Amino acid sequence: MSAFVIGQMHIHSRDWMEEYFAKIPAVVSDNAGEFLTRGGDPEHLEGSNELPDAAFIIEFPDRDRARKFWNSDEFQSLAVLRRSGSSLNAILVDRLP
């Protein structure tokens, strides 16, 4: 069953972005993932949480592949770079059967 990593990002500086966004698509793809949306133009529909600067959804074949991606050395090295100028809230959820 497919699984999705869904994230909301708050950007504090842009110094890291060029390198990160040049490399992240290949790391996702190498782990059998596919971006369904990335960046976008977040818009409030309900709630009072602060609107993120960017959001993403990545689809993986299953939770195991999503976790393998998240815990991979390649992604974690990019995550260190990303954390130098942003904060992220990310969750893992399953596709409906």
Image: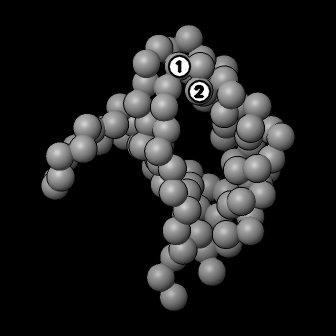
In this rendered view, identify the residue nearer to me: 70 or 59.
70
Mark 2: which amino acid? Arg
Q: In this view, does 6 lie above or below 14?
A: below
**Separation (CA) of disc 2 from disc 1:** 5 Å
Where in the figure is residue 70, as x and y percent of width and height? 70, 50
Local secondary structure at mark 1: loop
Residue 95 in sight in this render: yes
Q: In this view, does 70 lie above or below 77?
A: below
Task: Look at mark 2 in the image and give the residue it sits on.
Answer: 83
Task: Identify the colour scheme used.
Answer: one colour
Mark 1: which amino acid? Gly
Q: Which corner quadrant of the image does residue 76 belong to?
A: top right
Q: In the displayed structure, does residue 29 sit left or right of residue 85?
A: right
Local secondary structure at mark 2: helix
Where in the figure is residue 6, as x and y percent of width and height? 48, 54
Q: In the displayed structure, does residue 74 sit left or right of residue 21?
A: right
Q: Which corner quadrant of the image does residue 60 belong to?
A: bottom right
Mark 1 surroundings: few (<14), some (14-19) or many (≥20) residues within 10 A: some
Task: Look at mark 1 in the image and give the residue it sits on.
Answer: 85
Where in the figure is residue 94, as x and y percent of width and height? 54, 74
Q: Image quadrant for the N terminus?
A: bottom right
Direction bottom: furthest residue:
97
Q: In the displayed structure, does residue 73 sit left or right of residue 49?
A: right
Which residue is at 50% across, 26% downward?
86
Q: Residue 19 carries which label?
A: none
Q: Is residue 19 above or below residue 44?
A: above
Asked if the residue under mark 1 is in contact with the one under mark 2, i.e. CB atoms within 8 Å, the reply is: yes
Which residue is at 76% across, 31% downward?
77
- In this rendering, the count of numbered labels is 2
Which residue is at 51% across, 88% downward?
97
